Image (cartoon, rainbow, N blue to C red):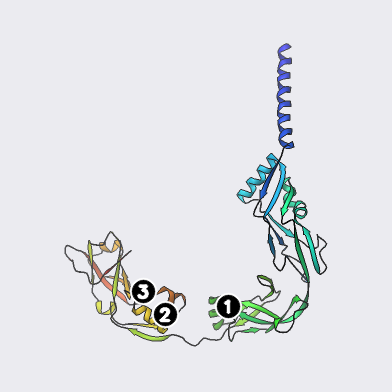
Amino acid sequence: MKRRLNFGKILITLFLTVLIWVWADLALDDQYTVSNARVSVAKRLSPGLWVSFAGQATVPLKKLVLTGSVRKIADARAKLNDGSFVPEFFLNPEHEQMTKPGEYALDVAGFARRSDKIRRLGLTVDLAEPNAVTVTVVALEKKTLVVRCVDENQNIIAGATSEPPTIDAPVPADRGGGALVAKVRLSRREIEQARLSPIEKTPYVELAPNHIRQALVTVKISTPKEPDRLQEYTITNVRLGFSLSATLQGRYGVKLTNPDVVMGPVTIKATPQARRAYENMRYHVILEIDDSDRDTTKTDLRRELIYNFPQEFVRKDEIRLSKPPAQARFRIEPTATQPARTGPAVTE
């Protein structure tokens, strides 16, 4: 009976000790400062309103100070580190009674404190910097806008047409005249595609710099066929280079069986600048030699040449081959039996 009573006392003591530690842990407050928080306007708003922070859709916060128990602060820090908690708070103007045009002061700390994100963490917000931000609410009015096509650098695409040529979309009520424009942005590839057949795109309205709103309709865009900017040239005195791995260099030589084809004139279509740059390249054509080529000795190998066009002009589509690539016929032989090489090596 005495042993059972002592054992019970030990259990009660341990239970109370653990309870005290848990209570102490929960009662002890800690703080954590978040430096990458932001407040953003909610994505889905009434089509008749434009809500922004001085024309911007997002305002960054220098800091957001969270307070709570040591354990919950540690949990929040872990969730921030693994990305399961993103400190972005979305402003819905209807929830904040900001539905009439005008300017409103938003208490950032109070707004974040009321958010579901903070509540789910079991924390509170003690401080935000800035402590208040101005929310601007502008009434929008549906007006007829001219569709204008621009490239990725916002340059107008000359001759591009839209069907229909205008759309109806909401814009600030005081906007008029030449500012009644909806834009369609086309990539370089889309510009080329629209030359062949119309492409479907969604216009957007630029409410402010870097702040756009997509229209609710699509249009079909066509771009004019571009006159050929490239002229045809023939490159003579063609220089050939070989691309060999370190395994083959110095141990094997390359023997061409159709050098007249490989180093014959190259016909290209290019701008004058691209032609000059290509003529000045160290090698005009390159023949790649694979390590496995040394295993073929009885028959000629065949491989298309690589035309060493300057990449700057390739990216701008200012140089291209006029005819299919020439095909080299060759063998590789050990240098002991075939020391001569018909062209310089290009090291990899």
Q: How many marks?
A: 3
| Circle on res. 308 | 3
Q: Residues within 10 Å of mark 2 (few under 14, many from 20)?
A: many
Whole-Å distance between the Cαs marked 2 and 3? 11 Å
Whole-Å distance between the Cαs marked 3 and 1? 29 Å
Residue placed at 19% from the left, 63% from the top?
Answer: 335
Q: Quadrant of the N terminus?
A: top right
Q: Are marks 2 and 1 in contact (CB under 8 Å)?
A: no
Mark 1, secondary structure of its residue: loop
Q: Amino acid at mark 3?
A: Asn
Q: Quadrant of the C terminus?
A: bottom left
Q: Amino acid at mark 2?
A: Ile
Residue 55 percent location from the top left of the image: 71, 69
Residue placed at 68% from the left, 53% from the top?
Answer: 63
The residue at which mark 2 appears reads as 319
Q: Can see residue 323?
A: no
For marks 3 and 1 on the same chain, the one whose residue lies earlier in the sequence: 1
Residue 275 percent location from the top left of the image: 38, 82
Whole-Å distance between the Cαs marked 2 and 1? 22 Å
Q: Is residue 282 above or below residue 73?
A: below
The residue at which mark 1 appears reads as 151
Is 204 in front, or is 33?
33
Q: In the picture, residue 191 is in which quadrant?
A: bottom right
Q: Amino acid at mark 1?
A: Asp
